[in-house]
Image (cartoon, grey):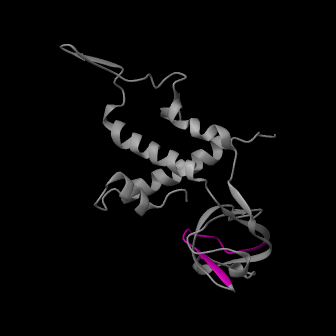
Amino acid sequence: MILYLEEAKKLLKIKDDSQDFELELKLKALETMIRNKTNNKFLDTRVRASKKLLFNDGNTITGANFNDLGFRVGNTIDIDDSIQNNGVYEVLEVSETYMKVKEDIQEEECNCLITKVNYPSDIKLGVIKLLQYDNKMADKIGIKKETIARMSTEYFDMGNDESVEGYPAALLKFLDKYKKLRWS
């Protein structure tokens, strides 16, 4: 995960738990959007397991010494070449015999690839800015121009080139340097 729930709550100055579910969904959606927009999985290929692995009940993965390979608690991992478990997962426990992830996994035995995901600091900063924008502008969506007496308020038009994925294009410029070519 680019930014954990507790970090996001602290940065946005949210004290109660009433928005946890929505905020966690936003964080996951932003991670997916960033990975798709950049065509970049942000993989750290130095920390990787590529062999026959078993995906078991209890969200555990066995078949390698994950501790020696460099996986740690709190890591985000990307699973590829699996029939049922491709995706991004958060590591809860790591030992010499198994690795436990937060998200649900399906029972499976396969030759697959598990790689650590490492997001640069400027990606994290960009996500923080997007979350702050969401917090600040949530109730102002739709205002194009408003004039009261001599005070005028005007926001950008969400229907043209100024908007990308519901955010101002300028807020997503931090992704440009991480974009990779898409081969079909």
**Nearer the observer, 99 or 44:** 44
Residue 169 picture location, percent across and down: 53, 30
Q: Is residue 110 left or right of residue 129?
A: right
* Residue at point 69%, 86% (across, down): 97
Would you place residue 179 above or below residue 94 in this image? above
Does residue 103 lie above or below 57 as drawn?
above
The C terminus lies in which quarter of the figure? top right
Image quadrant assignment for residue 176: top right
Q: Which residues are magenta?
A: 98-110
Please, is residue 160 above or below residue 94 in the view? Answer: above
Quadrant of image for the N terminus? bottom right
Say whether residue 85 is left or right of residue 5. Answer: right
Q: Nearer the viewer, residue 161 or 7?
A: 7
**Nearest to the observer: residue 143 or residue 126:** 126
The furthest residue to the left:
149
Q: Position of residue 4 (x, y in %)?
A: 47, 61
Q: Residue 133's x, y, as percent?
A: 40, 40
